[in-house]
Image (cartoon, rainbow, N blue to C red):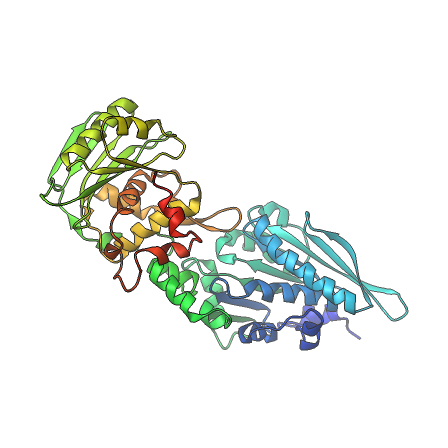
Amino acid sequence: MTTAFERRKMSDLRAVKPSQAFFKFIDYKPYPFQQEIHDSPALYRIPIIGRQSGKSEVASAEAAFELCCVPDSSGWIVAPTYEQASIIFNRTYVKVEKAVARLPHLKITAYSRRDMKLEVSHYDRQGNLIGVARFAGKSGDKPDNLRGASLTYCIIDEAAMILKSVWDEALSPTLSTTNGWVLMITTPKGYNWVYQWFADGQDQNNRRYQSWQIPSWVANPRTALEFYEEQRRVLPDLTYRQEYGAEFISDAGSVFVGIDEAPRVHVSARRDIPGGVSLTAKLRQPGHGYVIGADFARLNDFSVFTVVDLNTGEVARQDRVNIVAWAQQLAHLKEVSREYGNALVVADVTGLGDPLVEMLSAQGVPVEAVRFSSLQIKEALISKLSLGIQYKKITMLDDEDTRKEFRSFVYTRTESGQLRMAAAGAGHDDRVISHALAWSKVPAEFITPAEQIEKGSAFFDQFGIDMDSVNALFD
């Protein structure tokens, strides 16, 4: 008679699947898409699903089933970071606790929340030990810690953020002797190695693989469609399609979609200034209002002053300087403000304090200070600029260096797995921030039609920021 372990090694399909009876023990009622994933016999399952749709519930239910119903199982949850892995690990433990309380033949014999290790011992009716199921959480950013184990299953969370080499060199060998199964749950991140797995899963003749591509609004029936419509209105198009629509986007890493197609204004004058260069497209137009976004230099960055015409949405001028004394920079900024009708200066003083703003104000320059007290607030202003570019409402300077910096401003993941915006590698972001500060004062009608965004308030909802807190940015 062959054991369950031996049967699993001989098959190219999963040996066992979670049952509805077990789901009742853990108080889990799967959505239709979740049930379809659980029912799939494929060894390699690849659900490509949008945000906030229940992917973690699928994974934790699968792990809990293996721990409670397969005595010889050994599995991992692997995520881009330790903190991300802990989310599914902790949900798994909660489900196992419920099952153990209702099934007398099970006992949790080892558990460490900190080390993310969980063991469940299985006993027969006479109280004899028949097996121990093990589960652990691992971080994909330390592949050396993933070597040498032998697993019967592996769950990979946000796989698109994990390097292919981690799978090839560390994870795949752990399953080779057991023919173990893999559940890869992720939102897409361009056409990387995960896409190839997804494509394999779409091949009806390949029964070892099965994949799904499900937008958030289809996967999660409990969230009102109005929420997704609002996200569509306030997020850049490619961001929305990737994060909620679960689409594979070739340039999904870029924050500024359509920067090369954005309207451009010719640089009519380019001249050297102390420590830098000044690009002028248009001089002051009678009856027009202007705003200057001032991003002051930190470390190796440049100070950039971007002048935007509030009447037309055009960038009229951009000055970029470095290695110049603060007093000299402020004197120059005062002169630029004067040339554009005593234009308002919106200055980022994060990390610099108030002295620069106080000195400008003392010289009669109208100025408002912005403090990026959280990444959310900074990214709210950048996203507003991104929407202006996407909808071709802002007219950029015809300057390749500026476009290059905008192209290199990308989405990245923090250690906790959150999506963030930053210059790629060691690149600069001073032009981006300067533009965003100026664009923050452009009327909402310039971004999208008024019926889409009501005076910008809906735009900030996605970040959990009300308009009062946004207004409080400006002293």
Identify which residue, 64 or 146, lies in the foreground: 64
Q: Is residue 227 left or right of residue 294?
A: right
Give the residue drawn at x 34%, y 57%: 236
Residue 52, horizontal then vertical, whole percent:
50, 63
Q: Quadrant of residue 72?
A: bottom right
Instruction: Say how many tags the image has.
Output: 0
Residue 422, compared with residue 327, is above or below; it is below
Residue 405, horizontal then vertical, whole percent:
30, 43
Give the residue drawn at x 40%, y 47%: 469
Give the residue drawn at x 67%, y 77%: 20
Q: Is residue 180 among what the camera can see? A: no
Residue 106, compared with residue 474, is above or below; it is below
Q: Quadrant of residue 296?
A: top left
Give the residue drawn at x 80%, y 75%: 1
Q: Is residue 232 among what the camera can see? A: yes
Q: Quadrant of residue 14?
A: bottom right
Identify which residue, 411 or 30, lies in the foreground: 30
Q: Is residue 281 left or right of residue 197?
A: left
**Split into 4 quadrants, where in the image is the C terminus?**
top left
